[in-house]
Image (cartoon, grey):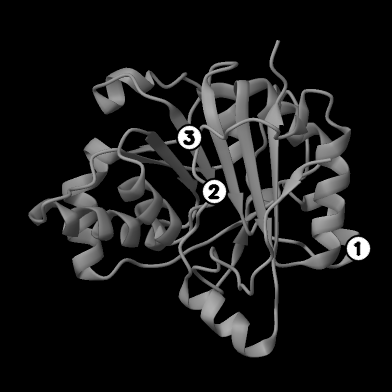
Amino acid sequence: MPHTLPIRDNGRVNDADLDTTETLEQRPTRGNRLYPRVTSFRSRRGALTLPQQESWDRCWPELGRDVGDDRVDVGAWFGRSAPVVLEIGSGTGTAAVTMARAEPHVNLIAVEVYKPGIAQTLQQIERTYDTDTPIRNLRILRGDAVEVLEHMVAPESLTGVRVFFPDPWPKARHHKRRLLQPPTFALIASRLQPGGVLHVATDHAEYAEAIAEAGNAEPLLTALDWESPISHERPVTKFEDKAQRVGSSITELVWGKIRA
């Protein structure tokens, strides 16, 4: 069984935009996927404000990349060797920025598809440059997280993976679109180092049960009974504050990759 963190009231961290007009199912799919699936997320359109665009122009060439087929040289991108943590679905960057600041010894890569959300993340990073604690350890990949894991991340190279509030696709006929299914657990486990950690949070009770079942069935993952190499503390967002008022709660699950 995974380690279950204390439950607290929460809302969705990554609901960066509700104006969803185009799905990635409308795009051509790759024929060489390790784990073919119906795309688990909606591609989100949205125009950038002028300040967002200006921040994007200044920061994206250094801090961001579009998802592709080439493996990321993480050490070269960050300019150092350090533990690597991947956050899937970073939304507007609330968790990514806060956790990057709290873990300066970690190279954090956030994966997101929504451009205005990424732009807000870049703005938050840029605002720290004039402070005593500028954030230098956060990078962003724009695109499908499974594409990232398949093509851009080396096996056994990640210290941690964080998946906070993935889309639950609550209707039964849409469950096939969910990100966290057995093949994705297998893929994530293959990219974790022995002793590495997968931390999942969801505010959807039925999805939590499905996630727990799939994670517990993955043979490379086990209950975390050793000291975690990454922090499990997340920032409380405005969505969590709203959820507290309506009585919503979350489930947080943590697995470790088996050690030889």
The amino acid sitting under disc 1 is: Ala
Work out how far the residue at label 2 is from the one at label 1, CA to CA, in angstroms: 30 Å
Identify the element where label 1 is drawn.
Answer: helix
Q: Which mark is residue 85?
A: 3
In contact (CB < 8 Å): disc 2 and disc 3: no
Query: Label 2, on which residue?
Result: 232
Q: Quadrant of the C terminus?
A: top right
Question: Looking at the image, is 40 positioned above or below residue 158?
Answer: below
The amino acid sitting under disc 2 is: His
x, y percent for residue 17: 51, 70
Nearer the observer, disc 1 or disc 3?
Answer: 3
Residue sitting nearer the eye, 95 or 167: 95
Identify the element where label 2 is drawn.
Answer: loop
Which residue is the extreme one toward the top?
Answer: 260
Residue sitting nearer the eye, 176 or 96: 96
Q: Residue at x 66, y 49 (%)?
A: 200
In contact (CB < 8 Å): disc 2 and disc 1: no
Which residue is the extreme one toward the left?
Answer: 130
x, y percent for residue 209: 86, 56
Earlier-in-chain disc, 2 versus 3: 3
Residue 198 falls in image quadrant: top right
Crowding around mark 1 (Cα neighbors within 10 Å: few <14, some 14 to 19, many 20+) is few
Q: Quadrant of the N terminus?
A: top right
x, y percent for residue 236: 48, 69
